Amino acid sequence: MTGAQKLKLVVNFVNLSTLAGFAVGLIGRARFSRGPRGLFLATGYRLGFPAAGAFTIGNVVLTRRDRAYLDARPLLVAHEERHSWQYFCLIGLPLLPLYVVGAAWSWIRTGCPASRNPFERLAGLADGNYVERPVQPFGRTLQQTFRRR
């Protein structure tokens, strides 16, 4: 672990985001283990939300899958580590409502919560297993959604 990664680990504990990640993992009955670069891996997460294959809160990467799934996907773990840096930069939990705003904006523009979400783009869309979708004319996604009902 580098000095910067150690600093991130400490700051994300102090800003409570890593502790929140442990709390969510406990609620979701995940199994915890140490991961690379100061991360903690919470595998076997049992709650249905969020729908992502993996997600990060502080320095805790949560997934419904097992440890072997993450070990076999170093790019995904690197993507999730970039999210842990976002918690560091935004002083912890304020990232969560900002992420929701980014996801909503992306969904309005593309029909996908990740494609134009600045947090996912900065973490690397491809590394997070996201496909970039084209921007649609403003409001088109909303019109399509309401037509389907």
Image (cartoon, rainbow, N blue to C red):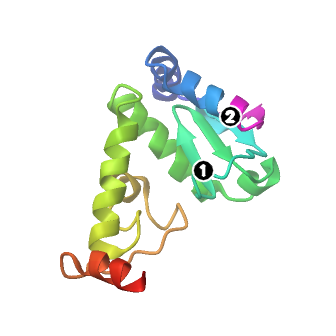
71 w.r.t. 33: above or below: below
Considering the numbered disc 1 on the image, is that residue within a helix, a strand or a loop?
A: loop
> Label 1 vs label 2: CA separation?
12 Å
- Classed neighbour count for the residue bearing mark 1: other residues with Cα under 10 Å, few (<14), some (14–19), many (≥20): few
Q: Which region shows up in magenta? A: 25-34
Decide if residue 107 is on the left or right side of residue 139.
right
Circle on res. 49 = 1
Q: Quadrant of the C terminus?
A: bottom left
Place of residue 29 in the rendered image (x, y in percent of width and height, measured from the top left): 77, 36
Q: Which residue is mark 2?
A: 25
Residue type marked 2: Gly
137 w.r.t. 71: above or below: below
Between 6 and 53, the one nearer to me in the picture: 53
| Quarter of the image where one finds residue 148 | bottom left
**Residue at (63%, 58%) from the top-left corner?**
53
**Residue at (77%, 33%) from the top-left corner?**
33
Between 22 and 146, the one nearer to me in the picture: 146
